Amino acid sequence: MASSIENNNEKLTLKSSDGEEFLVEKHVALQSTLLQNMLDSDCSSADVIPLPKIDARTLALVLGYCKKHADASSSKQGELNSFDSEFLKDMDMGALFNLVLAANFMEIKGLLDIAAQKIADTIKDKPHQEVREIFHVENDYTPEEEAAVREENRWAFEGFP
Amino acid sequence: MEILSRLSVKSLLRCKSVSKNWYSLIRNPSFISLHHTHAQPHDCISLIRTDNNFTYHSFYYLFPDQTSIQHLDLSFTERPVDLSCFRIRGSCNGLMCLSEWFKANIMICNPATREFRLLPRPPYHNWLTNHVGFAFDSKTNDYIVVRVATLYEFSRIDHKIQIYGMSGDSWKEIAATVPNHRLRPYDHPSTLMDGVFYWLCYDFSIEVCAIDVLNTVEGSFKRRALPVSVGSESRPNICLLNDSLALVVPMYDNQLEETQFDVWLMKDYRVQECWTKKYTIGPHLRKSASIWVSAK
């Protein structure tokens, strides 16, 4: 028992891609399945865990989310839901994409769900030309090919340019 | 992938136009499977109610604590044939199998993408189509359709069992002996699970509904009694519910003009028949032409 209480108070250090270090309580870090697996397999002996794919701004957001969810008891689901929607409310597309990538990499399912859903909700009623711009995708169709693909599901384009 | 798998089907179909990469991603089976996981409400039973001319369906999603209704209109213009004589024979992973009353015209349809596939004509296509079952077969990783074709002549009744595999797009006949039995005067609800094909029948000798069990792998056949006595006036249905065989018995109240549905589940169907009454649904539904239940 003594050791488990001790463990709860342990902290670990995460390092973002741009070199900033974050001191995190262990129970907050456990929101991430990636970190949980690392701790379980004792990879945590290193003093600092580098997260080379996540910049400091994104990591700060991710840890804010994890702290809220780690500290709240399960009875406060309503409070967590309103925290989640407030958390993403004014976030721009770039920040959302970074969050999705970070949540995917760190395996934080709840965060991945809400961030990916938020982007999906934003693009769901947009014409595909706009979706292309948002995702910075190059159009590699010839005009003929694009018309043919569109014809496969003509009904889905009703009311769209 | 995580983002796109949370879009509606209609938005996704438009996204196929974004680029060639996106096009192949959206058609990729593992993406489709991920999308399906995200799209399905959990712990939900859905009923499909069909009107008599088969152009309109209502889906009732029955969550443990609430009921929501969605309507599905199959009368859109892309359909290749007149659907008025078609009936739903089964549904699986969002796909539906439809067949024309007693005929050999069978199709598989994805109502979400409005895509249809008409199956090639089976052998003995001029025989009556008695039963049609539809399922995903995990052994062959393929969608299959089973058809029981019946020849009626004055002196002879004969049955042929055929299986269609979607990936090969072809039919093959399997050896199985089905005893002669007379046709019920209307739809035969049926369902397919683990290679075993079940259909409801009307046993004229004792004047109640019974269930026929055909094992398409072993070719064996047996007839089993239902847990409740159901006469010819009722229209029970069978389907799959959480990997169990489920029997849905409508109980129509003439005074209230409302129908309540009793759902029975059969456990360990291969060992011995053991039915338990699991749910009673309603009585908020009007009398309807046919009811399907499916679950996630």
Image (spheres, coloured by chain):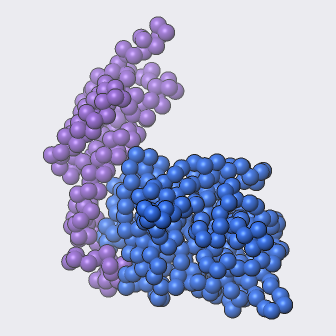
Q: Is residue B265 visible?
A: yes
Q: Residue furthest left?
A: A90
Q: How many marks?
A: 0
Residue nearest the observer in this picture, B232 or B167 = B232
The residue under the point 50% across, 26% down is: A40
Q: x and y percent of residue A160 in the render?
A: 22, 75
The residue under the point 34% across, 45% down is: A112
Q: x and y percent of residue A1 in the render?
A: 49, 9
The residue under the point 35% across, 71% down is: B13
Which tint was used for chain B?
blue
Q: Image quadrant for the C terminus of chain A?
A: bottom left
Q: x and y percent of residue B89 in the render?
A: 58, 73
User: Residue A105 is drawn in which quadrant?
Assistant: top left
Residue nearest the observer in this picture, B278 or A71 = B278
Q: Is residue B220 left or right of residue B287?
A: right
Vertical order, B249 against B102 (above or below): above
Q: x and y percent of residue A89 in the render?
A: 18, 45
Q: In the figure, the purple chain has which letter?
A: A
The residue under the point 46% across, 68% down is: B287
Residue nearest the observer in this picture, A116 or B91 = B91
Q: Residue furthest top?
A: A2
User: Residue B165 is drawn in which quadrant?
Assistant: bottom right
Q: Is residue B59 left or right of residue A82?
A: right
Q: Is residue B274 left or right of residue A150?
A: right
Q: Is residue B168 visible?
A: no
Vertical order, B166 against B257 (above or below): below
Vertical order, A85 against B39 (above or below): above
Q: Residue furthest front?
A: B255
Vertical order, A5 against B187 (above or below): above
Q: Is residue A20 left or right of residue B41?
A: left
